[in-house]
Image: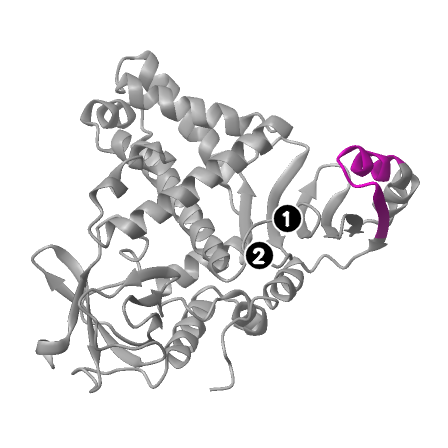
Amino acid sequence: MLDGISSLIPIARHHVLASALRAGQTFRATVHGTGDQPVLLLAGARIPIEGGARLTPGQTVHIEVVDSNAGLALRVLPGETPSGNVAASPDAALRAALAEVLHAMGAARHADAAEAIVPRFLPPSSLVLRQLLALFFERGALGADLDRIQQWVAQAAAAGAAPRPTAENVLAMLAALAAGDVRAFADALERLARARGLEARLANLATGDAEAAEGLDDFLTAYLSRLAAHEPFRQFLRANGALRGFEAAARRIQERLDGVAVQNLRGLEQPYVFLELPLPADAALRHVQVHFIGTGRGRRFEKDNALIVIDVSTARLGDLWVTLSMVNGACRCGFRATDARAVEAIRANAGELAEALRDAGYPRAHVEAALWDGDRLRETAALMRRFGGLDVKG
């Protein structure tokens, strides 16, 4: 096992990797960073290799997931292959796991799209792949689940069966989400920014940074977990026949948010943010997903050089695929709609829409509309190909 020159990296219980790994797994990876500060990229997380002075960028290492006194850890071994079955390549293991997940989802015919959507740096974890693909292969019920959670928490709080601070925080978050208006959209963006900051703190936590634990309670799922463990709250739900419903809804919310977090790991490759709005079922906008992609030279978003793609289903115009492309300050807004009447309506109002874009700071704005077949999965795959997906040639 070459223990004398191996590095053992602890993985915190709350780390984004924790749900994807299990003891006994083995991977092959490449060292990044510098000779003084070698790092691994695993499941999108940047993990410093402590005591790795002998490792050099570009070197291949073998990773074994082990149980340690501190919990789950990664053992990094250079040179010889560790005992156990190591996949011939990371892509081969990921392709095998992807095929298994697609079969279970009844979506094997969409393998080409899935291969474009899945980043090659993901671990071959069925759970992680399922959460990611579900975002685009299945219309989620996040809004409806959050609405039910809000009702149960409000009822329990009124009956004194929920801890007041936790219940108030949950209800405040859910009320903002349920608004279904522009303000809620802005609030969701702010929450996403905080969630991304939380992921960064969790990544630091895996390397022993105690300050990284600060702010964990700001996350919605942390509050839901706390409620689920509060016995008076559980007794209230049980008495009202709602305990199983709450647990199922909370589990679906967690899985959906985990999928969003995995998709946002694309931001490691270039400026990118993904957002799914949990709108109420009766809202005019339904099933809204937004991709923000930076197209400038730096690692930050530039207002005048960016691409925004909105996948939305509406009550009046049907399904729409909307692209806002900003290049050197010029904005081209393209609407693709499945309903010919929607195309005509958008074209009739193109001048008004262009004026709104000019008011938003894009003086050179152009709006166009075209008929669309509604294949959102194909469009998403094409969008993700700009990042580079799974290598299917191996």
**Residue drawn at x 29%, y 56% as measured from the top left:** 19
Q: Residues within 10 Å of mark 2 (few under 14, many from 20)?
A: few
Side of 52 where 183 appears, left or right: right
* Secondary structure beneath label 1: loop
Amino acid, disc 1? Glu
Decide: is 180 above or below 7.
above
Residue 245 in picture, x, y percent from top left: 36, 35
Side of 246 where 383 appears, left or right: right
Residue 140 in picture, x, y percent from top left: 52, 46
* Secondary structure beneath label 2: loop
**Residue drawn at x 10%, y 61% as measured from the top left:** 68
Q: Which mark is residue 298?
A: 2
Asked whether the viewer can see residue 151, the reply is no
Q: Which mark is residue 82?
A: none
Decide: is 379 above or below 92.
above
Query: How far apart are labels 2 and 1 at the CA level?
Result: 8 Å
Side of 278 where 214 appears, left or right: left
Q: Nearer the viewer, residue 55 or 26?
A: 55
Q: Which residue is mark 1?
A: 302
**Residue drawn at x 67%, y 49% as measured from the top left:** 308
List the single residue furthest toward the front: 36
Q: Nearer the viewer, residue 174 or 361?
A: 361
Q: Residues within 10 Å of mark 1 (few under 14, many from 20)?
A: some
Residue range corresponding to the magenta coloring: 352-369
Amino acid, disc 2? Gly
Q: Is the residue under label 1 in contact with that under label 2 (CB below 8 Å)? A: yes
Q: Nearer the viewer, residue 70 or 8?
A: 8
